[in-house]
């Protein structure tokens, strides 16, 4: 039984591959490496002592996707592959609709045709509207505020329609809160291209000296210290949630949505303090203006995943920061310094 992992070379994908391999699953990774590096897969293979197939393809390439399904005994799919930068999606929405929606449609058509109807879909807490009650439960109305979020929302709707049309489909939609952290080994982690948009990669680059200071996007929110509050979840906890979802969809056909978060909120200043404890250095920062589109507070009600998937996040904020710091120190330039492509061949053994 083989699990197809689309976008498996990315940040969450590579950590999920490690957990799948450690649990004995056979996997195939399909990735176009547009925003990821084959080195992450080479390292996933090293960490687990397992070999697996890696296919470089774009999901929009119907022929290649069909070939993938015809040549392999795929049982289920975990679908990560997508563009994910909110700001870029606002500047170039068509790029996001084209890639995220068209790629998913080709994938779903191939799954349907080859009778592979078990899917774990990578969604985001971004789909919730700004008016959602905190902590946010799955039953809250969705209403994404940007094109990236809307691609996730539209795919969720597409998947629901599919399930209604044919209940042999079995689908778990996972809405992630704020994934951070890195594998304990320091071998795989988040490797943003360009200037990081997200808080933790930015702080880590300040700590290592790649950037001068953090700009905190507003300290005039109605929160305990005025800075924004988020639900930061360790990427390995998140990866384990995918395995629980995979088990769940395998027993009996379902369409269910689960929040994957810790249920706890930390402010930007609290995160800066936690990171300072982890790296033993001061993180210089200044207070800037609010970032457009940001909400004051966002954290999960994660009880549904606990009750139905028997999953709960276990790793606390200090350990999340320690793991990021280890990854950042061991890989100050991310995967960039590593030679291209050698990884794919070694990881696949092909
Ligand atoms: C962002 C995305 C969300 C995505 C998530 C992935 C937006 C509006 N949302 O969420 O769609 O799923 O990342 O992790 O971009 N902050 C600073 N300075 C910085 C960066 C961030 O003060 O340089 C603050 C933000 O204002 C926010 C908190 O840190 O209060 C977290 O920000 P970020 O890591 O970008 O995540 P989100 O905005 O929650």
Image (spheres, rainbow, N blue to C red):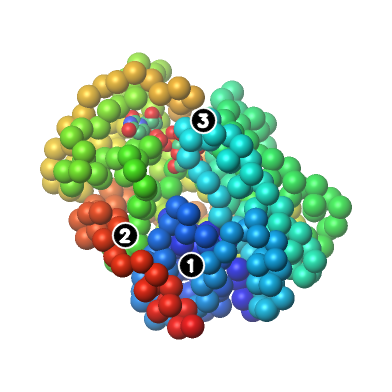
Quarter assignment of residue 49: bottom left
For marks 3 and 2, the one nearer the N-term is 3
Residue 125 position, x and y percent, is 55, 39
| C-alpha separation, residue under disc 1 versus residue under disc 2 | 17 Å
97, 325: nearer the viewer: 97
SS category of the residue bearing label 3: helix
Q: Which residue is mark 2?
A: 335
Q: Is residue 183 left or right of residue 172?
A: left
Residue 166 position, x and y percent, is 85, 57
Labels 1 and 3 touching (C-beta < 8 A):
no
Q: Is residue 146 above or below residue 279?
A: above
Residue 188 position, x and y percent, is 35, 62
214, 311: nearer the viewer: 214
| C-alpha separation, residue under disc 1 versus residue under disc 3 | 32 Å
Identify the residue at image location x=38%, y=39%: 198
Quadrant holding the N terminus: bottom right
Q: Which residue is mark 1?
A: 17
Q: Comparing marks 3 and 2, which lies closer to the viewer?
A: 3
For marks 1 and 3, the one nearer the N-term is 1
Identify the residue at image location x=52%, y=76%: 53
Q: Is residue 13 left or right of residue 305?
A: left
Q: Which residue is mark 3?
A: 91
Q: Is residue 333 above or below residue 46?
A: above
SS category of the residue bearing label 2: loop
């Amino acid at each position: 039984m083989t699990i197809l992992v689309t976008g498996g070379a990315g940040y969450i994908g590579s950590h999920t591959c490690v957990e799948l391999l450690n649990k004995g699953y056979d996997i195939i990774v399909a990735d176009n490496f547009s925003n990821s590096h084959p080195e992450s897969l080479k390292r996933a293979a090293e960490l687990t002592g397992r070999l697996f197939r890696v296919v470089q393809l774009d999901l929009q390439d119907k022929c290649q996707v069909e070939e993938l399904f015809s040549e392999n005994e795929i049982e289920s799919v975990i679908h990560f592959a997508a563009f994910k930068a909110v700001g870029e999606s606002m500047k170039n929405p068509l790029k996001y609709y084209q890639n995220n929606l068209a790629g998913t449609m080709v994938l779903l058509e191939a799954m349907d045709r080859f009778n592979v109807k078990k899917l774990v879909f990578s969604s985001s807490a971004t789909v919730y509207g700004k008016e959602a009650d905190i902590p946010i439960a799955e039953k809250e109305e969705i209403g994404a505020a940007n094109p990236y979020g809307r691609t996730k929302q539209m795919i969720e709707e597409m998947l629901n329609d599919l399930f209604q049309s044919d209940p042999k489909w079995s689908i778990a939609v996972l809405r992630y809160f704020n994934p951070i952290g890195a594998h304990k080994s320091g071998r795989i982690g988040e490797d943003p291209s360009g200037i990081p948009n997200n808080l933790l990669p930015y702080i880590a680059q300040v700590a290592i000296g790649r950037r001068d200071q953090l700009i905190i996007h507003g300290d005039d929110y109605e929160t305990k210290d005025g800075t924004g509050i988020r639900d930061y979840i360790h990427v390995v906890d998140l990866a384990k949630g995918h395995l629980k979802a995979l088990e769940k969809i395998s027993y009996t056909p379902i369409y269910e949505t689960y929040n994957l978060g810790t249920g706890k909120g930390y402010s930007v200043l609290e995160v800066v303090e936690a990171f300072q404890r982890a790296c033993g250095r001061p993180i210089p920062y200044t207070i800037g203006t609010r970032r457009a589109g940001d909400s004051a507070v966002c954290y999960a009600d994660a009880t549904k995943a606990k009750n139905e998937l028997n999953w709960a996040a276990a790793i606390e904020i200090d350990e999340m920061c320690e793991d990021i710091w280890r990854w950042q120190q061991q890989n100050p330039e991310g995967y960039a310094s590593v030679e291209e492509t050698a990884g794919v061949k070694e990881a696949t053994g092909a």
